[in-house]
Image (cartoon, rainbow, N blue to C red):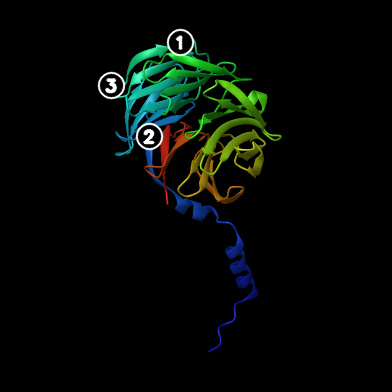
């Protein structure tokens, strides 16, 4: 029996579907919205997150509200709002000591909290515009970007300073190698990425952002030797070879990005964009990336956190109109 003939239009649509990149519906399957956690009374801009994996908690820097919000991610509920901060921006949780470090932008300090009681243990002053925080577990140091251009290294137990590195401008997102001694730092006012030797406490190289400006977020694929940098003008993601410092890929993304994450298990990059979407890229090889589409979020959703242990991407949605502030929980398929 001969197969039935298909109309030419149907054949054309079938071919287009086979060769087109994965679209919006496909990305909904990869990033499935499984929960929404409200944050009652939280107003204004929301900045960065930290996770307490052992206790299934998420800490959210509610910058515009001068609070840190504590979420129970096992029960998908708001647990507590902690006041007393001055524009909290960066957060880092230390699992061994159960300490929470909070960088305060307008209060010009870093607070160290007991993450159990959420009480302040110590305040580290004179850190103007304290911003992003990272934990160097091997060295036992917490690193903060602050001021008109510096990284300060602090003892993870005492908070005491153990030196700093001067930069050409205020540092935004930065990433630390775990198998090496380098830090990669976005310095948007200088329009470059600074490469810092953490042992020598010095800048060893600067990499141009290839005609782009406002390079704020960053993610590192250390095993694959690639660094992902998000820029806002124009809205692009730059991919660097961390051995040569060369840009190997330049990809258009949504506007107003402030967080990028690399999913090593699935070879994906998640770009959170303030225009109200998450862009998803597939790493086909070290130098080749395919845009798999975008998942709609909410207006001004610029920040979040990828927690690979839970296979969850958490995205912050600020209060807007009648919609309260909330965290959108996406499960990765």
Residue marked by disc 1: 125
Residue marked by disc 2: 38
Mark 2 crowd level (few <14, some 14–19, many ≥20, 10 Å Cα) = some
Cβ–Cβ under 8 Å for marks 1 and 2: no
Number of the front mark, 2 or 3: 3
User: Could you say whether the residue bearing mark 1 is in a helix, strand or loop?
Assistant: loop
Mark 3 crowd level (few <14, some 14–19, many ≥20, 10 Å Cα) = few
Mark 1 crowd level (few <14, some 14–19, many ≥20, 10 Å Cα) = few
Give the mark nearest the N terminus, 1 or 2.
2
Q: Position of residue 287 (x, y in %)?
A: 62, 47
User: Could you say whether the residue bearing mark 2 is in a helix, strand or loop?
Assistant: strand
What is the total number of numbered labels drawn onto the structure image?
3
Residue 266's label in the rendered image is none
Residue marked by disc 3: 117
Residue 114 seen from this side: yes
Q: State how far apart marks 2 and 3 are (Cα).
A: 22 Å
């Amino acid at each position: 029996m001969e197969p039935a003939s298909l109309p030419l239009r149907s054949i054309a649509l079938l071919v287009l579907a086979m060769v087109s990149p994965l679209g919006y519906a496909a990305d909904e399957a990869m990033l499935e919205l499984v929960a929404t956690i409200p944050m009652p009374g939280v107003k204004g801009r929301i900045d960065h997150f930290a996770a307490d994996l052992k206790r299934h908690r998420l800490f959210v820097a509610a910058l515009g509200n001068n609070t840190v919000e504590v979420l129970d991610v096992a029960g998908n509920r708001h647990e507590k709002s902690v006041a007393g901060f001055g524009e909290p921006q960066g957060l880092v949780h230390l699992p061994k000591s159960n300490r929470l470090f909070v960088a305060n932008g307008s209060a010009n300090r870093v607070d160290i909290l007991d993450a159990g009681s959420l009480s302040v243990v110590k305040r580290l002053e004179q850190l103007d515009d304290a911003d992003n925080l990272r934990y160097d577990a091997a060295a036992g140091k917490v690193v903060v970007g602050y001021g008109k251009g510096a990284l300060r290294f602090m003892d993870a137990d005492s908070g005491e300073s153990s030196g700093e590195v001067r930069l050409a401008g205020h540092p935004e997102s930065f990433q630390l190698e775990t198998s090496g001694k380098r830090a990669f730092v976005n310095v948007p006012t200088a329009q470059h990425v600074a490469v810092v030797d953490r042992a020598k406490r010095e800048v060893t190289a600067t990499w141009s952002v290839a005609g782009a400006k406002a390079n704020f977020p960053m993610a590192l694929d250390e095993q694959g030797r690639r660094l992902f940098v998000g820029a806002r003008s124009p809205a692009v993601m730059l991919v660097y070879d961390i051995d040569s410092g060369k840009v190997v890929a330049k990809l258009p993304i949504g506007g107003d990005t402030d967080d990028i994450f690399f999913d090593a298990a699935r070879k994906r990059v998640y770009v959170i964009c303030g225009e109200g979407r998450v862009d998803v890229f597939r790493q086909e090889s070290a130098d080749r990336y395919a845009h798999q589409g975008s998942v709609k979020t909410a207006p001004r959703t610029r920040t979040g956190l990828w927690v690979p242990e839970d296979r969850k991407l958490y995205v912050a949605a600020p209060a807007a109109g009648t919609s309260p502030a909330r965290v959108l929980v996406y499960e990765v398929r």
